[in-house]
Image (cartoon, coloured by chain):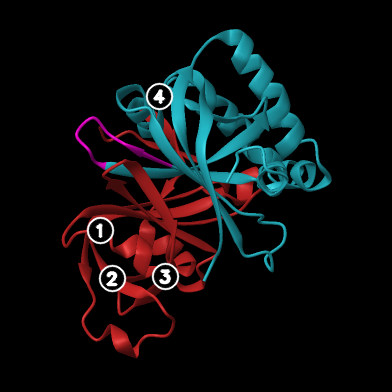
Amino acid sequence: MNPDDPAVVDILRRAMVARIATVSRNGRPHVNPLYFVYGNGKIYLGTTDRTLAALNVKANPRVTILFNVESEPSDRRVLTIHGGAIVRTDSRLNRWYLLRDVRKYFMSRRGLGNTLAHARLLPLVRRFVSSGDKGGECVLEVQPAEVSLATEI
Amino acid sequence: MKRITLNVNPVEARDLLERVPRACLAFAGDEGPRVEPVTFWFKDDRYLVGIPSTAASHLTDHEEVVLLVDDGVQFFDLRAVYVRGHVQPLDGAADLAGNLAWLEVQPTRAVAWDYARIREVDDES
């Protein structure tokens, strides 16, 4: 299946959480749910550079990502994308990603409602993000290579 | 010393294992990482996983896997249980529903997180 097939693009535009599988330098598997944006035929996932996902990508660029349309539980399609990833730390790309991430996840009615309902936690989130415990912000840029679409059993 | 964490005791996220919004199983395939959506059943504190037979054929006995059960789309709704372990075929799987290969994940480590439970804790490291 072609990565720019309309059915693939439709899911990538509607899916909200990507579950990205990576493998460590020692061959150990890992999977993590991450926010993402789709653009320029690529998938961009936001994380920090000390997470297992980012460390694994630096060691082994191959990734596999699962997507589904969470807003429609009756839609049982599952999109699987295999591709090559790189860790992008440049500020230009990170700014580009952040703008789209905020627009996608926080500037919607549901996103704003969720944030306002938890407004008391925002200072903690700000400290968590800026503490540096997880490293600096980065983006995993994934170039899709193989795509398959299946129906979940 | 204090630090901020999203982590919770997996016992506190047990409802995710019983309700199972989304579940997937990751492992290291011959041609790179693989991740498959799975049917998950938490029975008697055992992690039972139903996986399409075609995908199961890529797994070997006792292979290391990661089982992820996660929920939520909005930031403060994001929750997950992450189980690292080893798979083995499940005895008596014929009794289970579905046209799937059934495996048991024997956990070596389980963690859970819940973005709505972000908080400051004593740093014991």
* Residue type, label 1: Leu
Whichever of labels 2 and 3 marks the residue nearer the N terminus, that label is 3
Is the residue under label 1 in contact with that under label 2 (CB below 8 Å)? yes
* Residue type, label 4: Asp
Range of the magenta residues? A21-28
The residue singled out by tag 3 in the image is B40
Q: For marks 3 and 1, give the CA distance.
A: 17 Å
Q: For marks 2 and 3, give the CA distance.
A: 10 Å
Q: Are marks 3 and 1 on the same chain?
A: yes
Whichever of labels 3 and 1 marks the residue nearer the N terminus, that label is 3
Q: Nearer the viewer, mark 3 or mark 4?
A: 3
The residue singled out by tag 1 in the image is B59
The residue singled out by tag 2 in the image is B103
Q: For marks 3 and 4, give the CA distance.
A: 33 Å
Is the residue under label 3 in contact with that under label 2 (CB below 8 Å)? no
Q: Secondary structure at mark 1?
A: loop
Instruction: Name which quarter of the figure residue A58 lies in.
Output: top left
Which residue appears farthest toward the bottom when viewing the image? B95
Q: Is residue B108 visible?
A: no
Q: How many marks?
A: 4
Q: Is residue A26 magenta?
A: yes
Foreground residue among B96 and A124: B96
The chain carrying label 2 is B
Q: Colour of chain B?
A: red
Q: Nearer the viewer, mark 2 or mark 4?
A: 2
The residue singled out by tag 4 in the image is A133
Where in the figure is residue B102, as x and y percent of width and height? 32, 74
Q: Secondary structure at mark 3?
A: strand
Q: Are marks 2 and 1 on the same chain?
A: yes
Q: Secondary structure at mark 4?
A: loop
Q: Is residue A86 above or below residue B29?
A: above
